[in-house]
Amino acid sequence: MKPPSRDVWIPAAVAAVLLAAAVAALAAWRAHDPAAGIAPRLPGADGRPAGTEIAAEKVAVGEIFEDSGWRPPPRPEPLPGSWPRFRGPDFDNISKEKIPLADRWPEGGPKVLWSLDLGEGYAAAAVHRGRVYVLDYDEKRKADALRCLSLENGREIWRRAYRVKVPRNHGMSRTIPAVNDQVVVTLGPRSHVMAVDPDSGALRWTLDLERDFGTKTPLWYAGQCPLLDGPAAVLAPGGKDALLMGVEAATGRILWRTPNPRGWGMSHSSIMPMTLKGKRMYVYCALGGIAGISAGPEDAGRLLWELPDWNPQVVVPSPLILQDGLVFVTAGYSAGGLLFRVTEKDGRYEARTLRRLSPSEGLSSEQQTPVFHQGRVFAVLPKDAGALRQQFACALPDDPGRIVWSSGKQKRFGLGPYLLADGKFFILDDDGVLTTVRADPDRYEELAEVRVLRGPDAWGPIALAGGRMILRDARRMICIDARRS
């Protein structure tokens, strides 16, 4: 191809300089309002003002809708039970249902009510009003897909999807939707947020955290699960102008933002609510430190306290809220655990580290968030925990260096999830073996063991609703009848 002549090249260069100056001027004009140019994208419209620069790949979030045409037969009431978010209704991974669950399994194992093939990943289920919601990755179409299924038989009712390239990196999907009667909210591997009607699948609003807020998606893609709290969806972009933010769940309008002057980034950890002396707040383990953010309503989004002491390169477990302002955080890759206390005096809040532990000095976890129950903390220890590596263990909340008991060297669980229900822990190992353990604060008592999945990488959190237990490995999800016969 012939190169351009000099008299063409010079005006083009001048034009480029003028364009850059115009863009800089526009940016300066917008600086007084960090929200300028950012709006939720509604169905059929990008929602982005003309001239706004696009730093990342443009994705038409929610563009695809497919209705199976099938609907569950009418019932007087939906199937019982709800597991509407990551870690369940009360954020503690403990089911409060009064349904007796099996201590032993029949010969041949539990009854499998349905099973489903998935794209590779660890994204798990949310359950509400007889429906199951899972954010899958369609590998053939290169698309994130929110799939709505029947809890009763696993049949797909509808799916809402969008095309986005997610190269395989130890799987793709990792997050759990948050759902209530009005909306279901998802956060995809590349930090795309989508809100839809939980019944019809109609698109409500979307956000692209990478493009809109400068979010740097973590190495193994987004692992943060969205939080629905009253009228707000709460997210942690970890971007230039928003460490956390509240979004009106019905419309996508940004309600508040927490500034991020330290430049802390998005981690794989999820936001956990906490109440101290009647004050509600959100606790988040960012890449850079831990922050406590007011949940309002009078000062929603205000930074109440921060703790830079905890700064591992990779953070997956969420903060474990204990008692009297005690919080325990943990991570893998030699990070160990940290116990700190939040205090309040005259309206001022402070977080102070009490103890830090290496993985071999006490309780810690690499991937799953521990469970606090009956004055004890329970977790599967990481692979670098020395002689206790990958064992299920119990420790004291105010002294996590003191291990009360562990499952023993013959019983290791890898990175698998666990859930507490009906006085029992149900623990899934990497290869799909489900172990039932009595929730005893003083000793390890195993009740049953059965293979329910083939594996590998059965890491997705367990969901439980109405005695139906939903589990998954890297490529398959199953629903078993966990009720006592």
Image (cartoon, rainbow, N blue to C red):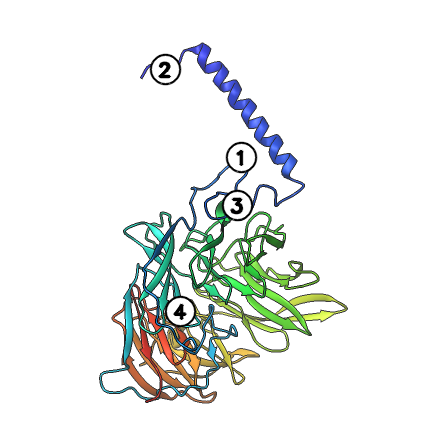
Residue 3, numbered circle: 2
Of marks 1 and 2, which one's residue comes earlier in the chain?
A: 2
Of marks 2 and 3, which one's residue comes earlier in the chain?
A: 2
Query: Circle 4 sits on which residue?
Result: 131
Asked if marks 1 and 3 touch (Cβ < 8 Å), the reply is: no
Quadrant position of the N terminus in the picture: top left
* Residue type at the position of mark 2: Pro
Quadrant position of the C terminus in the picture: bottom left
Of marks 1 and 3, which one's residue comes earlier in the chain?
A: 1
Of marks 3 and 4, which one's residue comes earlier in the chain?
A: 4
Of marks 4 and 1, which one's residue comes earlier in the chain?
A: 1
- The residues bearing labels 4 and 1 have C-alpha atoms spaced at a distance of 40 Å
Q: Is residue 446 left or right of residue 297?
A: left
Q: Residue at x 48, y 47 (%)?
A: 210
Give the quarter of the image for residue 249: bottom right
* Residue type at the position of mark 3: Asp
* Dot 2: element: loop
Asked if marks 2 and 4 touch (Cβ < 8 Å), the reply is: no
Query: Circle 3 sits on which residue?
Result: 212
Q: Nearer the viewer, mark 2 or mark 3?
A: 3
Of marks 2 and 4, which one's residue comes earlier in the chain?
A: 2
Query: Circle 1 sits on which residue?
Result: 50
* Dot 3: element: helix
Residue 22, numbered circle: none
Q: Nearer the viewer, mark 4 or mark 1?
A: 4
- 484 over 341 or under it: above or below: below
